[in-house]
């Protein structure tokens, strides 16, 4: 495996749809807007994907230094470690290792990988910056600079000092903010020179809620393991320190808020005349969202449940393999939350393109 392939794989590239799909949605929604520069869509998409991978590795860097317990100890307790986050790093950060074969990478190598991904993302951002300045003037670059700096600051402080937002129960909300509003408004600024519009803000909040739910469902299912490990998540904040149904009720209420809010915002945008009634086709994902709420509630309260995938839930991966690994109970709801976001964005993208053609 090449060095680049090694780092792309271990940067959890499986999570790329969480940033790429909102980016693609924003790109499509920008088609037809005044000042739209179509060819910038390519560097913008590549830049956002590279920034996502770089931030994932930065999260590993800070988490690895923050955790005092060994990987083996963590993996016996938490699904987060069983999914082998940071497994590619040597326990001895000064160990002279390579990144090929079964060998491990050092913290120093990880640092250079982070610099590499973020530098590439910065180069793509500079491309958009230069194009907007040349074509539309310096005023068109203001939004690009603001969203890029905000994304970098919040992304680093997700796990890094001084804020360490992910360790204070705000990680899920931060990711929703980065991949939703900052991502999509930033794309609009890069492609059109327009730093803000209520339409894009509304849609970005809707998609940001869905992305938030992917991580939040994870945290709800891991709330007890996270408490044992001392990891603070938004679910733990809501659950509180005392055992009982009140905390569980609060957790499920927010699952419902994140799941239903996108459709409320969609209906609001249609009512205001921002979007075509054909956008209602995205309501096809509403039953999946309702089932996600129901299924997670059964899990949280320890009620009988049947974690057998249904065809309408979308692709569920190597389900037999997940069952053998003992992680099917977790992936059942996590993949469902991810598929809801994927289908919502794809339906929206296809609908908007067809409307533009017709």
Image (cartoon, rainbow, N blue to C red):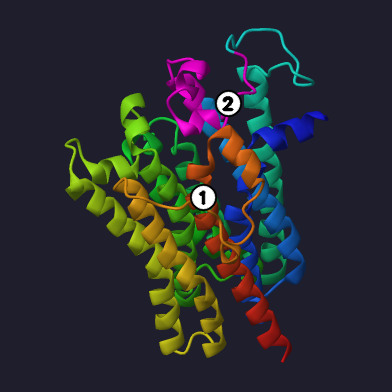
Name the mark on residue 86. Answer: 2
Instruction: Give the residues drawn in magenta, as a range.
Output: 62-90
Q: Residue at x 33, y 44 (%)?
A: 234
> Is 68 covered by the magenta stretch?
yes
Q: Dot 1 lies on which element?
A: helix
**Residue that mark 1 sits on:** 332
> Is 30 covered by the magenta stretch?
no
For the residues labelled 2 and 1, the Cα–Cα distance comes to 23 Å
160 or 240: nearer the eye? Answer: 240
One can see residue 258 in this view: yes
On the image, the x and y values in percent for residue 334 come to 50, 49
Q: Residue furthest right?
A: 2
Residue 281 versus residue 24 in the image, above or below: below
On the image, the x and y values in percent for residue 304 come to 36, 50
Q: Residue furthest bottom?
A: 358
Q: Quadrant of the N terminus?
A: top right
Name the mark on residue 70. Answer: none
- Residue 172 is left or right of residue 134, and the answer is left
On the image, the x and y values in percent for residue 349 come to 64, 73
On the image, the x and y values in percent for residue 45 come to 69, 57
């Amino acid at each position: 495996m090449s060095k680049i392939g090694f780092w792309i794989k271990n940067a959890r590239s499986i999570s790329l749809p969480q940033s790429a799909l909102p980016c693609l949605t924003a790109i499509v929604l920008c088609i037809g807007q005044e000042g739209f520069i179509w060819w910038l869509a390519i560097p913008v998409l590549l830049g956002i994907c590279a920034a996502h991978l770089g931030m994932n590795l930065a999260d590993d860097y800070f988490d690895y230094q923050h955790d005092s317990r060994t990987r083996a100890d963590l993996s016996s307790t938490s699904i987060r470690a069983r999914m082998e986050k940071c497994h590619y790093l040597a326990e001895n950060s000064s160990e002279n290792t390579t990144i090929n074969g079964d060998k491990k990478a050092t913290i120093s190598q990880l640092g250079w990988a982070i610099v590499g991904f973020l530098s590439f993302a910065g180069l793509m951002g500079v491309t958009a910056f230069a194009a907007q300045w040349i074509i539309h003037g310096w005023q068109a670059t203001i939004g690009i600079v603001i969203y890029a700096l905000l994304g970098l600051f919040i992304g680093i402080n997700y796990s890094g000092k001084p804020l360490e937002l992910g360790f204070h129960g705000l990680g899920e909300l931060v990711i929703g903010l980065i991949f939703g509003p900052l991502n999509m408004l930033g794309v609009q600024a890069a492609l059109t020179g327009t730093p803000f519009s209520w339409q894009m803000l509304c849609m970005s909040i809707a998609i940001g809620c869905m992305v938030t739910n992917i991580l939040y469902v994870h945290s709800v299912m891991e709330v007890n393991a996270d408490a044992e490990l001392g990891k603070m998540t938004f679910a733990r904040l809501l659950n509180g320190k005392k055992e009982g149904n009140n905390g569980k009720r609060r957790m499920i209420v927010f699952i419902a808020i994140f799941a239903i809010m996108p459709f409320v915002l969609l209906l609001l945008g249609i009512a205001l005349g921002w979007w075509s009634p054909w956008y209602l086709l995205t309501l096809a994902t509403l039953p999946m969202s309702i089932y996600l709420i129901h299924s997670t509630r059964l899990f949280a309260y320890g009620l009988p449940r049947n974690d057998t995938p249904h065809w309408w839930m979308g692709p569920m991966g190597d389900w037999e393999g997940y069952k053998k690994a003992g992680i099917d109970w977790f992936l059942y709801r996590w993949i469902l939350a991810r598929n809801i976001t994927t289908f919502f964005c794809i339906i929206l993208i296809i609908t908007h393109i067809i409307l533009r053609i017709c």
